[in-house]
Amino acid sequence: MDEIVVTMREKYGHERRTWVMDRGMVSEDTLDMLRQARARYLVGTPKSMLKKFEHDLGLRPIFHQKTERTQAHILVCFLALVMWRTLQQWMQGAGLG
């Protein structure tokens, strides 16, 4: 993950981006590196930790391991990206940065 972050920063600069990572990519070292860089991030929670908190939070985890669920997940992610980019354009147009 360190190599990916360095490559992205060299190629695109140190913009204030939000790093989104699958639970398989997350390690304490990676999180420490992101924290030290004052980066924003969203990471998947390991299943073992979800099990600890699901009862307290009243959660029932959904795992996207079936093809139809994966396709729906990709669609939702794409729609979120489109909405985010649209919001960015509206804000820039209004002079809000």
Image (cartoon, rainbow, N blue to C red):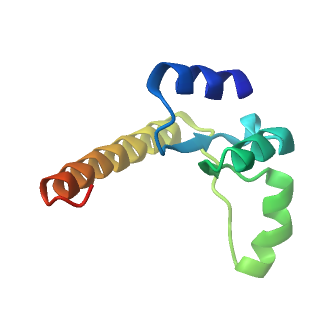
Q: Along the line of sight, which residue is nearer the eye, 48 or 67?
A: 48
Indicate the quadrant where residue 28 lies.
top right
Is residue 1 shown to the viewer in this render? Answer: no
Q: Quadrant of the N terminus?
A: top right
Q: Residue 67: image x %, image y %? A: 53, 33
Q: Residue at x 64, y 50 (%)?
A: 38
Residue at image point 25% right, 55% down: 87
**Seen in the image, is 84 located left or right of residue 77?**
left
Q: Residue at x 83, y 63 (%)?
A: 51
Residue 77 on image: x %, y %: 42, 44
Asked if residue 77 lies left or right of residue 63, the reply is left
Who is closer to the viewer here, 70 or 29?
29
- Tell me: residue 49, above or below residue 68: below
64 vs 37, nearest the viewer: 37
Q: Residue furthest left?
A: 93
Looking at this view, is 3 or 69 the one in front? 3
Q: Is residue 23 above or below residue 11?
A: below
Direction from residue 94 to residue 38 in the image, left or right: right
Quadrant in which the C terminus appears: bottom left
